[in-house]
Amino acid sequence: MILLAQVSDTHFDQNPHNADRVATVLDYLDRLPHRPDAILITGDLTDSGTAAQYEQARKVLRTDIPLYVLPGNHDDRANLRRILLDVPAATGPINRAVDVGPVTVALLDSTIPGAGGGALGAATYDWLDRLLARTPADRSVLVAMHHPPVPMYSTVVDPIRLADPQRLERTIAADDRILGVLTGHMHAMGTTLFGGRPLVVAPSVASAIGGAWEVRTPGEVPIDYAPDPSVVLHAVEGRRLTSILRTVPMGGRVSVLPG
């Protein structure tokens, strides 16, 4: 079994609130009896993409578990590359593939610089096609990006979801090696099907945003900073993907039923 921990929308902003929540989640993962084989952060690492926010992220994101990041709409490609990836600053899409045991994770950059919504450009689609062409038939594949490709009943995120996802959906439907798609952006847990595969949207570590049924007035953002942070644990065994949500209590664990 391969265990992948998905953390999303950390929104480092130089304040302690979000940083402490991320640190608590990483400590939980580090202390697990069966630790994840890798940690994936599906975008919006920072709140506004400044160098100082990435420096804060670099200080907090310390673990000996392999950790991989991809950008979200709040991120800056150049600063992310320079400070977190230790490569020269550049503004092109950050597309990467990582192998976690028998699983290849395709990390796609779905961001549009300066925009809240997402899209996969021709260069990214071509990159994914080349990756799949050279990936052995006996490997499993997970596709990860920031923007959900279908409506998720969020008045906040649905208008800025992934645009024109038809090519991606066709690619996923046609390749039996692809087990599922992992995204963030919504600040809530959600699951559905996309291309006949599970689409798993991870919640934000920083805050929770309610669905369409929680909006009282047009334009309201039903945001809540109180709920404890959560992480999604993805277990891959053979061609089966199992995803489990785990809330990590900021106040610590109570292992005996209170009287």
Image (cartoon, rainbow, N blue to C red):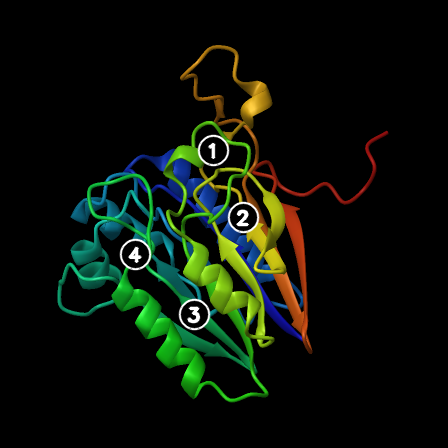
* Real-space CA distance between mark 4 and mark 1, rounded to the nearest whole angstrom: 20 Å
Q: Quadrant of residue 34?
A: bottom right
- Identify the secondary structure beneath mark 4: helix
| Mark 3, residue position | 106
Q: State the residue lying farthest toward the right.
A: 259
The percent coordinates of residue 107 (x first, y second) are 39, 65
* Real-space CA distance between mark 2 and mark 1, rounded to the nearest whole angstrom: 14 Å
Query: Tag 1 or tag 2, which sits nearer the N-term?
Result: 2
Between disc 3 and disc 1, the foreground one is: 3
| Mark 2, residue position | 201
Few, some or many C-alpha atoms within 10 Å of disc 3 (few <14, some 14-19, many ≥20)?
many
Q: Are marks 2 and 1 in contact (CB under 8 Å)?
A: no
Residue type beneath disc 1: Ser
Residue type beneath disc 4: Arg
Q: Quadrant of residue 128?
A: bottom left
Between disc 2 and disc 4, the foreground one is: 2
Q: Are marks 4 and 1 in contact (CB under 8 Å)?
A: no
- Identify the secondary structure beneath mark 2: strand
Q: Are marks 3 and 2 in contact (CB under 8 Å)?
A: no
| Mark 1, residue position | 207
Report the side of 259 relative to 13 (left or right): right
The percent coordinates of residue 83 (x first, y second) are 21, 60
Residue type beneath disc 3: Ala
Q: Camera-side residue: 209 or 118?
A: 118
The percent coordinates of residue 44 (x first, y second) are 35, 46
Query: Is residue 21 depicted above or below 220 in this figure?
Result: below
* Real-space CA distance between mark 3 and mark 2, rounded to the nearest whole angstrom: 16 Å
* Real-space CA distance between mark 3 and mark 4, rounded to the nearest whole angstrom: 22 Å
Query: Tag 2 or tag 3, which sits nearer the N-term?
Result: 3
Query: Tag 1 or tag 3, which sits nearer the N-term?
Result: 3
